[in-house]
Amino acid sequence: MIFIFGVNDGNVEEKQTNRTETCQRCGNTARWIAAKQSMKASLFFIPVFPIKTKYYYYCPICRDGYQITKEEYERMI
């Protein structure tokens, strides 16, 4: 019996925040995006369970930003 097991990057859930910030990289002022990326284990190419979740906050124009905590993500959305 053969099992095909792997890890995928999962999907990214992006939500625009109400906070307007000026980007240090591109200089544009815009409402930034809070994103949630979940890595999932898969069995036969079907996602089974989440392994790791990362949260990001970034500029919608140049996509420069930084990683944030789950608590900061929940406060922003």
Image (tube, rainbow, N blue to C red):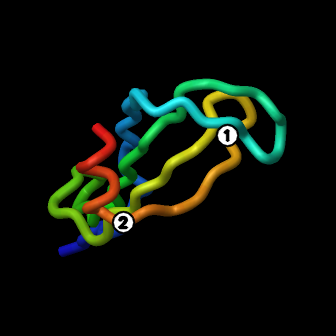
Vertical relation: 61 (above or below) 76: above
Label 1 Cα neighbours within 10 Å, binned few <14 / some 14-19 / many ≥20: some
Residue 49, x across and y down, in percent? 16, 63
x 33%, y 57%: residue? 72
Vertical relation: 7 (above or below) 74: below
x 46%, y 33%: residue? 19
Q: Secondary structure at mark 1?
A: loop
N-term-proximal mark, 1 vs 2: 1
Mark 1 or mark 2, which is nearer to you? Answer: 2
Q: Quadrant of residue 50?
A: bottom left
Task: Estimate the spatial distance between the alpha carbons at disc 1 and disc 2, rounded to whole Å.
Answer: 18 Å
What is the quadrant of the N terminus in the image?
Answer: bottom left
**Disc 1 target residue:** 63
x 76%, y 28%: residue? 28
Horizontal arrangement in the rendering, residue 43 relative to residue 24 (left or right): left
Horizontal arrangement in the rendering, residue 58 relative to residue 42 (left or right): right
Residue 25, x across and y down, in percent? 82, 45
Q: Amino acid at mark 2?
A: Thr
Residue 61, x across and y down, in percent? 70, 28
Residue 60, x across and y down, in percent? 62, 30
x 33%, y 43%: residue? 76
Q: Which mark is residue 69?
A: 2
Horizontal arrangement in the rendering, residue 32 relative to residue 44 (left or right): right
